[in-house]
Image (cartoon, grey):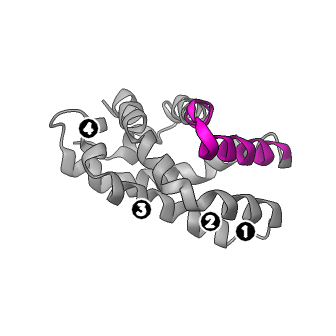
Amino acid sequence: MAALEDTLLNAQTVPAVRADVEALVDSVVSDKRGASGLALKTGYAALRRVGPTIVPRAVERLLPAFVEKLEPFWQDHAGNGSFAGYLSARDGQVADALLGVTDERVAGTSNGAVKKVYASLRPSAHRHVVDALPRLGALVEKHAG
C-alpha cells in the first residue's frame, strides 16, 4: 500500500484533504448534542473568535503529524475491509495517537487563549475523537483509496 503521506499530502490532493478535514471538524462539532456537545460547541466558537483562520491554519499545521500517526494503522489495515471499521475497532489506541499530536502542539504554544480553551475541552476530547473515527476513516479512504 502507498504511504498516506504520498497520497494525502501531495500537492495535488492536499488542498482537497484539508478542505475535507475542516468540513469533518465542523460537522462533528455541529452534530454534538447534550451538555458535552454544548461545551464543545461553545469552545469551538471561542476558538473561531480568537481567529477566524485558526481552524484552517491548525489543519494545515497538524495534518502532516496526524497523517504520520495514522500511517501504522493504514499499513496494518492493508485494504482489508473499511478503514473506518478498522479505526473504530481500535478506537482508544487511534484516539490516543491523534490526541498526542494536539497535546504536544498546545503544550508548545504561547497562545494563552488557545491553551485555556483546549484545557477546557481536553477532558472530553477522547470521546469526541472516537466518535469521529468512522468519518475520518472514510475521509482517508476517499483520498488514499
Q: Residues within 10 Å of mark 4 (few under 14, many from 20)?
A: some
Q: Which residues are magenta?
A: 25-49
Whichever of callouts 1 and 3 sits on the residue coming sooner in the sequence is: 3
Residue 94, x across and y down, in percent: 36, 55
Residue at 68%, 41% (x, y): give it. 38
3 is within the stretch colored magenta: no
Q: Nearer the viewer, mark 3 or mark 2?
A: 3
Q: Residues within 10 Å of mark 2 (few under 14, many from 20)?
A: some
**Type of amino acid under label 2:** Arg
Residue at 43%, 50% (x, y): give it. 67
Magenta-highlighted stretch: main secondary structure? helix
> Marks 4/1: CA distance?
34 Å
Assign a secondary structure to mark 3. helix
Residue indicated by mark 1: 109
> Marks 1/3: CA distance?
20 Å
Residue indicated by mark 3: 96
